[in-house]
Image: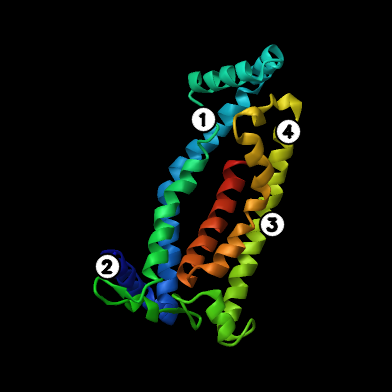
Amino acid sequence: MSACATAVERLAGLLQPLFHASAAAAAIVLITVLVRLLVHPLSRASARGQRARAALRPRVAELREKHGGDPERYQKELLELHAREKVSPLAGCLPGLLQIPAFVLLYHLFSGSAIGGGPDGLLDHRLFGAPLGHRYADALGDGGVFGSQGLVYLGLFAVAGAVAAFNHRRARRATAAAAVPENGGEQQVPGLAAAGAVMPFLSYLTLLTVALVPLAAALYVVTSTAWSAVERAVLYP
């Protein structure tokens, strides 16, 4: 943990001539971008997997027509088809799962008062006057919604809300397309129907996350979700 804190401090030092008091915040954004670049090949592989699933739709439709009266047999044949073609309906989850360690690390770096037996110097860093270790409740208690700290959060909420609305519209279109019978009933894969019904609304959980976690972790979440929105728009036109 202390090694990671040192790395963030050094990166912030390199960025300080450009970003001054907000150098640590800029370092977090840069770290987020680097993490997303590392995960990007998996995102591209996930996009290829989705195109492969689309190519299987006629065969899935045949299975549904053949075994529609026997749901258990249909599910078995469907899973075997995906296995033979090396296509996983859940492959798209992997890029998101691999980002969790970076988020957890930032959360812990900016949540405690000490690192490695010494004071946590990262807590002294700010984003436009808002301490990176504070939460939205702290901002409300120090100046209110339109105070200097509150305005920083309003900016993050605005970005997170815009990205969530964009993702919501795309998720609704994807869910509607998957529900069309000609698509071969991909929603019949175990768990996929329930996930498809809930998925359009999950984007808005970002707003709750931004409000509850330390500002440093919130900055990571907003940057990462904005990257995801752009990435998906490019990979899933």
Query: Tag 1 or tag 3, which sits nearer the N-term?
Result: 1
Closer-to-camera residue (104/99): 104
Quadrant showing the N terminus = bottom left
How far, Cα to Cα, is label 3 from label 1?
A: 27 Å
Residue at image mark 2: 2
User: What's the mark number on residue 71?
Assistant: none
> Considering depth in this image, is 165 or 194 the residue closer to the camera?
194
Q: Amino acid at mark 3?
A: Ala
Residue carrying label 4: 179
Q: Amino acid at mark 4?
A: Ala
**How packed is label 4: few (under 14 Cα within 10 Å), some, or many (20 or more)?**
some
Residue 194: name its quadrant: top right
The label shown at residue 88 is 1
**Amino acid beneath label 2:** Ser
Q: Nearer the viewer, residue 178 or 33?
A: 178
User: SS for tag 4?
Assistant: loop
Q: Nearer the viewer, mark 4 or mark 3?
A: 4
Residue 203 percent coordinates (x, y): 63, 54
Q: Nearer the viewer, residue 39 or 144?
A: 144
- Left or right of 180 on screen, residue 233: left
* Inter-mark Cα distance, 2 to 3: 37 Å
Q: Of callouts 1 and 2, which one flags the residue occurring earlier in the amino acid sequence?
A: 2
For the residue carrying disc 2, how many other residues have a C-alpha within 10 Å: few (<14), some (14-19), or many (20+)?
some
The residues bearing labels 1 and 2 have C-alpha atoms spaced at a distance of 38 Å
Relative vertical location of residue 20 with respect to residue 4 in this rendering, above or below: below
